[in-house]
């Protein structure tokens, strides 16, 4: 059975690249282009991993992560934050709100 990965990313080219890489590895990818859509998909779909951008329209990635950690259904989902925000304080904030890991864009597809 294919594992389901949710990508919450507002940049279409970044989303397509990560989707392509993951599908080549045999994963089923679900995408959302803003924080609210991502939250809804995370709660409705059977997700195994979330790849989450920080700079999103509506809810930003930090807010999305906090909401996911507060919901029983998604509290234990692995969350990988990916962002162009590369300061140490950005990474610390991401990990503090519940991300399991934080990568800085551009990310080498082989790392994902």
Image: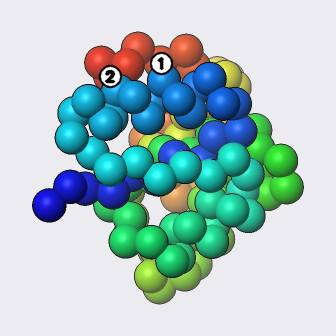
Query: Tag 1, which secondary structure?
Result: loop
| Secondary structure type for disc 2 | loop
* Mark 1–mark 2 CB contact (< 8 Å): yes
The residue under label 2 is 111
Say which residue appears at 32% left-offset and 50% top-offset: 28
Residue 107 circle label:
1
Q: Position of residue 65 (x, y in %)?
A: 60, 59
Q: In terms of image quadrants, where is residue 91?
A: top right
Against 55, residue 68 (above or below) is below
Q: Report the residue that reaches farthest toward the bottom.
A: 72
Instruction: Judge by depth and name the residue closer to the eye, 102 or 18.
Output: 18
- Name the residue nearer the viewer: 76 or 24: 24
Q: Position of residue 1 (x, y in %)?
A: 14, 61
Q: Callout 1 environment at 10 Å: few (<14), some (14 to 19), or many (20+)?
A: some
Identify which residue, 40 or 85, lies in the foreground: 40
Q: Residue at x 85, y 55 (%)?
A: 58
The residue at the point 73 percent across, 51 percent down is 34
Name the residue furthest left: 1
Within 10 Å of disc 2 (Cα), the crowding (few <14, some 14-19, many 20+) is few
Q: Relative to 92, say whether 64 is above or below.
A: below
Find residue 72 and report its horizontal and vertical position in percent.
Answer: 47, 85
């Amino acid at each position: 059975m294919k594992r389901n990965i949710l990508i919450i990313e507002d940049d279409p080219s970044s989303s397509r690249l990560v989707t392509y890489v993951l599908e080549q590895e045999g994963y089923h990818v679900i995408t959302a282009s803003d924080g609210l859509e991502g939250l809804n998909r995370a709660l409705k779909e059977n997700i195994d991993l979330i790849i989450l951008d920080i700079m999103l329209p509506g809810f930003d990635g930090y807010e999305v992560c906090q909401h996911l950690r507060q919901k029983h259904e998604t509290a234990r989902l692995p969350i990988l934050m990916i962002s162009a925000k590369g300061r140490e304080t950005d990474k610390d904030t991401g990990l503090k709100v519940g991300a399991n890991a934080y990568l800085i864009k551009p990310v080498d597809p082989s790392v994902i």
